[in-house]
Image (tube, helix red, strand yellow):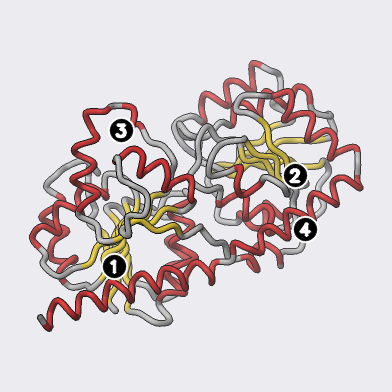
Amino acid sequence: MRILHIILSLEIGGAQRLLSDLLPLQKQNNEVKLLVFKKVETSFQASIEANGIEIINLNCRSFYNPLVVMRLIPFIKQCDIIHVHLFPTLYWVALATCKCKGVKLVYTEHSTHNKRRDKTLFRPIERYIYSKYDKLISISQQTQDSLMKWLKVKPGNRHFVVIENGVNLSAFSSVVPVATNKKQIIMVSRFAQMKDQETVIRAMTDINEDAELILVGDGPNKEHCEEVVRELGLTDRVQFLGARGDISELIARAYIGVQSSIWEGFGLTAVELMAAHKPVVATNVDGLKQVVEGAGCLFEVGDTKTLAFHINEMLRNKCLYTTLANQCYERAKYYDISRMAVCYQKVYEELFAHKRLEIIR
């Protein structure tokens, strides 16, 4: 099968990380290419290209220019399966395929919430756009439930499928930790609306002073968080490392992992932390709590006191730390990337079989 994945760019993010792990596996049985609206030099891009996968660059000046629809059509016509990720790619590909007969469309929903769902006037538009896709894959049951509720779709609709995210477990479990002067608490996330690094920063005022916070990632909220660190006098205990390509090594050095999100589709970074044998403390939100609950610890959004309590307990109690780390590692084993790749392949093969029947008829 000829499969084309389409995403805005390969900037650091969960969907991009997913593609960098998934595409090499899909290449084993298919002809796979990736189309981006704009190339961004990241470790994800380097990894995908190193595996011999072609990246088509539209070099768009704006992601929101509807003229991109016409530029997409020639590439879409060359493929059997078009697999789309994130907004506004969701819209532009749906409109482009109106001119591309026979192509099968797949969209992966990566989050339980977005700003469009705050405005009901978007619902009829979204119902039309989503209806253009042959399969709508959600990365967690909570993500699918939220999407179906938003679109007012009845349960049991065969176009909706849940395929939970996967992680290349060996990439994290096999890295040998490097000793550090202080016990490191790490959070790996973009500084974006759905993430909440500020709560973790504020919790540091109640966390034992022999620990430091490592924040990995970039984004629009980073400058604000840096200002909060200065206001709280934590500049010697909080490090901003920016976007990095050595995530597995950074996680290996850390002692405790934190995933603080206001909403989340799945919690891919939480799985990566658990795969590296790190105990995880995460916010009690749909999509994330299902990954961590029963293995690591949960706290409510913005609750700095409970977050600090869980971390301090692990810093003080080695037995508790080891128990939670082991539980998290066992939980991570369920989310192996190979399992996810098999599930996606089944979806593609089903759609491809239908395409062939349509051609015969």
Task: Tell me the CA gap for discs 3 and 2.
Answer: 34 Å
In percent of width and height, residue 83 lies at 31, 62
Q: Residue at x 82, y 52 (%)?
A: 179
- Circle 4 — which element? loop
Q: Residue at x 41, y 55 (%)?
A: 41
- Circle 2 — which element? strand
Amino acid of disc 3: Arg
The mark lying in front, picked from 4 and 1, is 1
Write down the residue under mark 3. 116
Write down the residue under mark 2. 256
* Of callouts 1 and 2, the N-terminal one: 1
The mark lying in front, picked from 1 and 3, is 3
Q: In the image, 198: left or right of 46?
A: right
* Of callouts 3 and 2, the N-terminal one: 3
* Image vertical order of residue 278 relative to residue 168, above or below: above
Asked if the residues shown at circle 4 and circle 1 are in contact, with their CB atoms under 8 angstroms apart, the answer is: no
Task: Tell me the CA gap for discs 4 and 1.
Answer: 37 Å
Write down the residue under mark 4. 177
Q: In the image, 64: left or right of 85?
A: left
* Of callouts 4 and 1, the N-terminal one: 1
Amino acid of disc 2: Ile
Q: How would you rate the neighbour count of disc 1 (Cα within 10 Å): few for under 14, some for 14-19, many for 20 or more?
A: many
Q: Residue at x 60, y 56 (%)?
A: 246
* Of callouts 4 and 2, the N-terminal one: 4
Q: Residue at x 26, y 78 (%)?
A: 353
Asked if the residues shown at circle 3 and circle 4 are in contact, with their CB atoms under 8 angstroms apart, the answer is: no
Mark linked to residue 4:
1
In percent of width and height, residue 70 lies at 10, 55
Front-most of residues 160 and 7: 160
